[in-house]
C-alpha cells in the first residue's frame, strides 16, 4: 500500500462519459515509479482511452508480468479485474483467461525485457493465436526494475549510463509482429498523448491481438545523451509515418483531405472506423508487404517510425478459430460443461 492515497472526492464539474463515469473512475493507485518515468504517461493515456471508450470498469481485465512496466496496471482502473503473473508469462495467462471468459476486455502491459527476452516465445504465440487483447510494450531499452541492464530492444552502439556500448542487434517488436502475422501493429511515444490515445482506442476495439509498442524513457537508467531511448533522442528522431484518428461507430465520418493528399478509412469489426488522415505515398496500412517494405527502408536510419502502421480487421481471432462459446464458462450450464460419461465416450469414439 503506497503511503499517499488519492482523495476519493470528484470535482462536480468533471465531464462524464456515456456510462456516467468521470475520468477519476478509470484511475488506479498512486504510482510508485520514479518521477518522470515514461510508463506513468502511458498510464494517463490508457485512462483517457478507456474513459473515452466508456469501457465498464468491471468488464476490464488488466494483465502483466514483472518489471516497472508490469506495475502499470496497479495505476489505472482500480475497479477492474487484474492478474500480475510471473516474468514473461502474461500472454499465456491472458490466453487462458480470455478462453474462459471472452466477454471481458483484455489489456496486457509488459516491458521490453518481459516481452523480448524471457517472454519472447509467449509473445510470439499470442500473436499467432490472435488472442483478443491489447498488448502494450513499455519500451525503454533496459531492465529498469533490476537497475538498467541492456534489454533486447537496445540499439547497437546505444550506451549504458556507465558508458558501455551495446553490441548486439536489437529485436524490434514491430517488425517481429508483422513477420508473425499480427493483425494490428502500432508504435508511439509516451511523450505524445495526442498520438497515443486514438491508437489505444483503436487497439481496444480491434478483433484479435493488437500490439502497441510505446517508446517510454527510463529517467533513472537510460535517459542520458548517448541513449537512443531517451526523451531527447525520441523527440528528435520520431517520424510520424501515419496519422490517424478513431471514430466510434455511432459517429458520422466526415470527408477529409490529408496534407499529402493521401488518406484512408479502415472499418473495424465493431463498426467503428480508423481514419488515416496522412499516409506516406504508396503506403497502404492494410497491405502487410508494403508496410514491411516501408519499415525496411527506414531500418538503420536512426529514425523512430511511429503511428498505427498496420491493421487488418478481417482475420478471425482465437475465439472464432476455436469456436469457443459466446458466454463465459462460468455461465455455461453444468450439464453442458460436464455432459456425462456416455457423451464423452461417444466423443472419443468419433476421434478413433
Ligand atoms: C524468472 C525471473 N527472472 C528474472 C527476474 C528479474 N527481473 C525482474 S524485472 C526484469 C526485467 C524487467 O525489464 P522490463 O520488462 O523491460 O521492464 P522495465 O522495468 O524496464 O519497465 C528482470 C530480469 C525475475 N523477476 N524473474
Ligand atoms: S527505474 Fe526506470 S523504468 Fe523503473 S520506474 Fe524508474 S524510470 Fe521508470
Ligand atoms: Mg524495460
Image (cartoon, rainbow, N blue to C red):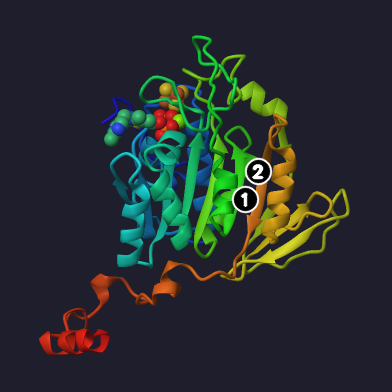
Residue in view at x 33 percent, y 46 percent: 89
Give the farthest residue toward the left: 341
The image position of residue 133, as x and y in percent, is 45, 57
Asked if residue 143 shows in the view, the reply is: yes
Which of these two is toward me, 106 or 210? 210
For residue 126, side relative to residue 244 (left or right): left
Quadrant of the rendering where the C terminus is positioned: bottom left
Q: Is residue 136 above or below residue 331?
A: above
Counting labels gives 2
Residue in view at x 67 percent, y 41 percent: 306
State yes or no: discs 2 and 1 in contact (Cβ < 8 Å).
yes
Mark drawn on residue 195: 2
Give the farthest residue toward the front: 352
Residue in view at x 31 percent, y 49 percent: 82
Residue in view at x 57 percent, y 15 percent: 224
The image position of residue 274, as x and y in percent, is 67, 60
Circle 1 SS class = helix
Circle 2 SS class = helix
The image position of residue 286, as x and y in percent, is 69, 61
**Quarter of the image where one finds residue 172:** top right
Q: Is residue 45 above or below residue 322?
A: above
Which of these two is toward me, 81 or 203? 203
Q: Is residue 190 above or below residue 284?
A: above
Image quadrant of ligand 2? top left
Residue identifier under label 1: 198
For residue 210, side relative to residue 323 (left or right): right
Asked if residue 68 shows in the view, the reply is: no
**Quarter of the image where one finds residue 31:** top left
For residue 178, side relative to residue 111 (left or right): right
Quadrant of the rendering where the N terminus is positioned: top left
The image position of residue 339, as x and y in percent, is 17, 85
Amino acid at each position: 500500500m503506497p503511503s499517499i492515497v488519492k482523495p476519493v472526492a470528484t470535482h462536480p464539474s468533471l465531464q462524464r462519459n456515456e456510462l456516467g463515469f468521470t475520468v477519476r473512475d478509470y484511475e488506479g493507485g498512486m504510482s510508485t515509479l520514479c518521477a518522470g518515468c515514461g510508463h506513468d504517461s502511458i498510464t494517463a493515456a490508457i485512462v483517457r482511452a478507456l474513459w473515452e471508450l466508456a469501457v465498464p470498469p468491471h468488464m476490464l481485465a488488466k494483465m502483466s508480468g514483472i518489471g516497472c512496466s508490469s506495475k502499470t496496471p496497479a495505476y489505472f482502473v482500480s475497479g477492474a479485474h487484474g492478474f500480475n503473473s510471473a516474468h514473461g508469462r502474461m500472454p499465456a495467462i491472458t490466453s487462458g483467461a480470455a478462453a474462459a471468459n471472452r466477454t471481458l476486455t483484455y489489456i496486457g502491459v509488459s516491458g521490453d525485457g518481459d516481452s523480448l527476452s524471457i517472454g519472447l516465445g509467449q509473445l510470439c504465440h499470442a500473436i499467432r493465436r490472435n488472442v483478443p487483447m491489447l498488448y502494450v510494450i513499455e519500451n525503454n531499452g533496459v531492465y529498469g526494475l533490476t537497475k538498467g541492464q541492456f534489454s533486447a530492444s537496445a540499439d547497437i552502439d546505444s550506451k549504458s549510463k556507465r558508458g558501455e556500448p551495446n553490441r548486439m542487434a536489437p529485436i524490434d517488436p514491430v517488425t517481429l509482429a508483422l513477420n508473425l502475422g499480427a493483425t494490428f501493429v502500432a508504435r508511439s511515444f509516451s511523450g505524445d498523448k495526442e498520438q497515443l490515445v486514438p491508437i489505444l482506442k483503436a487497439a481496444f476495439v480491434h478483433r484479435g491481438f493488437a500490439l502497441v509498442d510505446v517508446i517510454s524513457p527510463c529517467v533513472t537508467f537510460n535517459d542520458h545523451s548517448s541513449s537512443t531511448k531517451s526523451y531527447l533522442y525520441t523527440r528528435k528522431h520520431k517520424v510520424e509515418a501515419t496519422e490517424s484518428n478513431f471514430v466510434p461507430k455511432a459517429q458520422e465520418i466526415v470527408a477529409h483531405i490529408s496534407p499529402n493528399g493521401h488518406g484512408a478509412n479502415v472499418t473495424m469489426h465493431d463498426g467503428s472506423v480508423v481514419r488515416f488522415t496522412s499516409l506516406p505515398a504508396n503506403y497502404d496500412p492494410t497491405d502487410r508487404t508494403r508496410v514491411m517494405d516501408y519499415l525496411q527502408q527506414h531500418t538503420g536510419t536512426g529514425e523512430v517510425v511511429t503511428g498505427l502502421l498496420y491493421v487488418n480487421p478481417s482475420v478471425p481471432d482465437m475465439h472464432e478459430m476455436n469456436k469457443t462459446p459466446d458466454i463465459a464458462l462460468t455461465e455455461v450450464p453444468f450439464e453442458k460443461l460436464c455432459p456425462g460419461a456416455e457423451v464423452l465416450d461417444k466423443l472419443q469414439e468419433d476421434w478413433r
